[in-house]
Amino acid sequence: MKDWISEVEAILDQALPSAETVPELLHEAMRYSTLGGGKRLRALLTMAACVAVGGNREDTAALVAAVEMVHAYSLIHDDLPCMDDDHLRRGKPTNHIVYGEANAVLAGDALLTEAFAVLAKMPETMGISAETTALVISELAQGAGSRGMVGGQVMDIAGEGQDLDSETLRTIHDHKTGALIRAALRGGALLGGAHPEQLEQITRYAQGFGLAFQITDDILDEVGQTEQLGKTTKSDQRLGKQTYPRLYGLEGAKEMARLCVEECHSALQDFSQDADYLRELATFILQRDH
């Protein structure tokens, strides 16, 4: 899938306004965070979901760009002093450290709106039907908005310093982390022509994947190294956030992640070898060290 990651980087480079486009500083800041590396998991999930239902991954190019733009915007805002106040992301200074807080906020805003501009052009640039385009836009809007990622961020901030129970913690992360992952997977499946049953199974996979990803993220924040992760560790502890290792213990959290990945594989049992990319990505979650 390294070839796929190279494709993602090329798609993003082309989709983003050039650094020479006025206003130059804003577009430079947008590119700084979006093209700054990363696992590209959401983009890979988008492409893999399309392939899993029998589609062509080339048809996901606009959604790949949009999902990664939305993710980059969320990271820029998440790192701001008014939120997590982080100074390191993907192994380099965060956006507001390089460009200032005001420009970082605006770069995030611009990335969010640019994502939907890219999607809206799919009928013209990629020959995607207007109906499918509208469905994909709706998926991403819901996944990124107040009933998805942004809503989860609000709940996460409200929960700082509190001993949250398991149900509340899961609700927070199902919104903050899981919603955008679910939108990427469902959007990719829709672009691949998924029928309702396939879409339901992809959604089930997304639920397991999103929770497994968050649990392993919590674990890595506890035991990982800053140099390896490319971001400051122990940030959850510093902010007084409830986490899965804190609630269940390190071994208990690892077992929960393993069961979530099992659920991912179970959700794909009726799929052919075309879904092997999704299977590999789920297994990767348990093995990742960054």
Image (cartoon, rainbow, N blue to C red):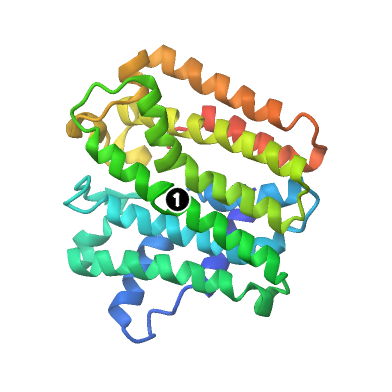
Residue 47 placed where, x, y %?
A: 66, 53
Q: What residue do we see at 48% from left, 67% from top?
A: 115
Residue 255 in the figure: left or right of residue 93:
right
Q: What residue do we see at 69% from left, 30% from top?
A: 267
Residue 149 placed where, x, y %?
A: 41, 47
Q: Can you see residue 37?
A: no
What's under tag 1, amino acid-wise?
Gly
Residue 258 placed where, x, y %?
A: 55, 20
Q: Is residue 179 above or below residue 160?
A: below
Q: Kindly state the secondary structure of the residue where label 1 is placed.
A: loop
The residue to which callout 1 is attached is 38
Q: Is residue 241 above or below residue 26?
A: above
Q: What residue do we see at 33% from left, 49% from top?
A: 91
Residue 85 placed where, x, y %?
A: 19, 48
Q: Is residue 26 above or below residue 210?
A: below
Q: Looking at the image, which is closer to me, 229 or 253? A: 253
Quadrant housing the C terminus: top left
